[in-house]
C-alpha cells in the first residue's frame, strides 16, 4: 500500500504480517470515512476519490505519529478511528498557526511589487476557508506561484506545506526588510527588468550580491557590485575546489548575518544554505571568464 510512505516519521519496518494487519485496518477505516464523506448515501465512490480519501487518512495519521514521536508500528495495534480524530485536532491547531504565519507574512511583505508574490499570499489567505481537514487533509487548495529561494520539499502536503512555505517566506521577508527597498528595486531592475511580472524570487539576487560584497570586504547594504568586483570574486574562486568554495561562501554568509544582526538561528541556517548553494553556479560560470551571470553587476553611469 503506497500510502504508507506518507506516515513513516521513523525508520520502523513492518513485518509482512504487520503490514497485512494494517492494510486491513486502513481499508476498514476508509469504508467508514467514505460513508461519512457521502453522508451515508453510498459506500461506493470513484477510485480516484477513494484514493484521495485514503491518502488523507494516511496523512492525518502521520501527523499524529510525528506529534507523539511514534512510528507506524503503533498503528498495528491502535484504534485508528481514535487516532484519526486526534490527528484532525492537531491539524486544527496547525491551521491556527498557519493563519498567524499568513498574517505575519502579509504585514512584513517587502515594499516591492511582484504579481506572483502578491497573488500567492492572497491565494494562501483563501486556503484556510477551502481546506478540508476532515477528508482531504493532504490537499493544498490554493495557487502557489511565487518561488522560494529554497523550496519546500515536494513530499510535504496539506497544512504542513502551507506552514513551512510561510515560515520560509517570513525569513525571506526579514532579509529583504534589512535593505533599503529603493536599492533592492535598483538591483532587481538590473537582475530582471520584468521582475514585477515574472516568476522570480525577490530575495535570491539580494542575498547573492550581499554575500559577494562581504567576500571582497565591502559593505553589503548598498548591494552594488561592479564589473571589477565580479573580476575580484572570480579570482577568489578560481583556485578553489567546489567543497572549498562552499566553505568560503558558508563563512561569508555567517559574517553577513552578523553584519545584518540576524540573530534567529533558523534564519541564519537558511541564509548560510542559500549562500553555499551558489557554488555550482559559480563553477559553471568561471570557464566563461567572469561571474556576471551569478552576481548582478550595477550599470555604471556614463560620462556626460
Image: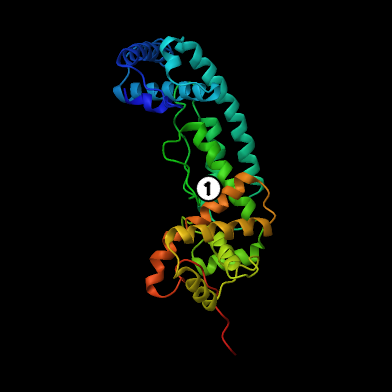
x, y (%) of residue 283? 41, 65
- Image colouring: rainbow
Residue in the image at 59% along x and 34% along y:
98
Q: Quadrant of the N terminus?
A: top left
Residue in the image at 54% along x and 17% along y:
86
Judging from the image, what secondary structure is the residue with disc 1 in?
helix
The residue at which mark 1 appears reads as: 119
Left or right side of 30 for 299: right
Name which quarter of the figure residue 156 lies in: top left
Residue 59 vertical position relative to residue 173 in the rendered view, above or below: above
Left or right side of 3 for 184: right
Residue in the image at 45% along x and 26% along y:
10
Question: In front here: 120 or 104?
Answer: 104
Q: Quadrant of the C terminus?
A: bottom right
x, y (%) of residue 228? 53, 78
x, y (%) of residue 129? 55, 31
For the image shown, how many numbered marks are present on the structure? 1
Left or right side of 78 for 28: left
Residue in the image at 55% along x and 32% along y:
128
Residue 303 vertical position relative to residue 52 in the rendered view, above or below: below
Name which quarter of the figure residue 29 lies in: top left
Residue 111 seen by the camera: no
Residue 207 seen by the camera: yes
x, y (%) of residue 46? 30, 21
- Seen from this angle, which residue lies furthest right? 261
Structural crowding at the residue carrying mark 1, measured as other residues with C-alpha within 10 Å and reported as few (<14), some (14–19) or many (≥20): some
Question: In front here: 39 or 234?
Answer: 234
Amino acid at each position: 500500500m503506497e500510502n504508507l510512505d506518507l506516515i513513516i516519521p521513523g525508520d520502523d519496518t513492518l513485518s509482512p504480517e504487520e503490514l497485512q494487519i494494517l492494510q486491513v485496518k486502513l481499508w476498514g477505516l476508509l469504508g467508514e470515512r467514505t460513508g461519512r464523506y457521502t453522508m451515508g448515501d453510498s459506500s461506493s465512490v470513484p477510485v480516484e476519490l477513494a484514493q484521495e480519501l485514503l491518502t488523507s487518512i494516511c496523512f492525518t495519521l502521520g501527523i499524529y505519529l510525528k506529534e507523539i514521536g511514534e512510528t507506524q508500528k503503533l498503528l498495528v495495534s491502535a484504534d485508528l478511528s481514535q487516532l484519526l480524530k486526534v490527528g484532525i485536532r492537531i491539524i486544527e491547531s496547525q491551521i491556527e498557526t498557519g493563519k498567524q504565519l499568513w498574517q505575519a507574512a502579509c504585514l512584513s511583505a517587502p515594499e516591492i511589487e511582484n504579481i506572483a508574490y502578491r497573488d500567492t499570499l492572497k491565494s494562501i489567505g483563501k486556503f484556510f476557508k477551502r481546506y478540508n481537514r476532515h477528508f482531504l487533509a493532504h490537499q493544498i487548495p490554493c495557487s502557489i506561484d511565487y518561488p522560494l529561494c529554497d523550496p519546500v520539499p515536494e513530499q510535504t502536503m496539506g497544512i504542513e506545506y502551507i506552514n513551512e512555505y510561510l515560515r520560509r517566506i517570513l525569513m525571506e521577508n526579514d532579509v529583504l526588510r534589512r535593505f533599503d527597498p529603493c536599492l533592492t528595486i535598483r538591483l532587481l531592475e538590473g537582475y530582471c527588468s520584468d521582475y514585477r511580472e515574472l516568476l522570480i524570487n525577490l530575495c535570491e539576487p539580494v542575498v547573492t550580491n550581499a554575500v559577494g560584497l562581504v567576500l571582497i570586504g565591502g559593505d553589503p547594504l548598498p548591494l552594488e557590485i561592479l564589473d571589477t568586483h565580479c573580476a575580484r570574486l572570480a579570482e577568489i574562486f578560481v583556485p578553489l575546489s567546489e567543497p572549498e568554495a562552499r566553505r568560503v561562501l558558508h563563512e561569508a554568509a555567517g559574517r553577513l548575518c552578523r553584519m545584518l544582526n540576524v540573530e534567529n538561528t533558523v534564519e541564519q541556517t537558511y541564509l548560510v544554505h542559500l549562500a553555499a548553494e551558489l557554488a555550482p553556479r559559480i563553477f559553471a560560470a568561471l570557464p566563461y571568464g567572469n561571474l556576471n551571470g551569478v552576481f548582478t553587476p550595477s550599470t555604471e553611469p556614463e560620462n556626460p
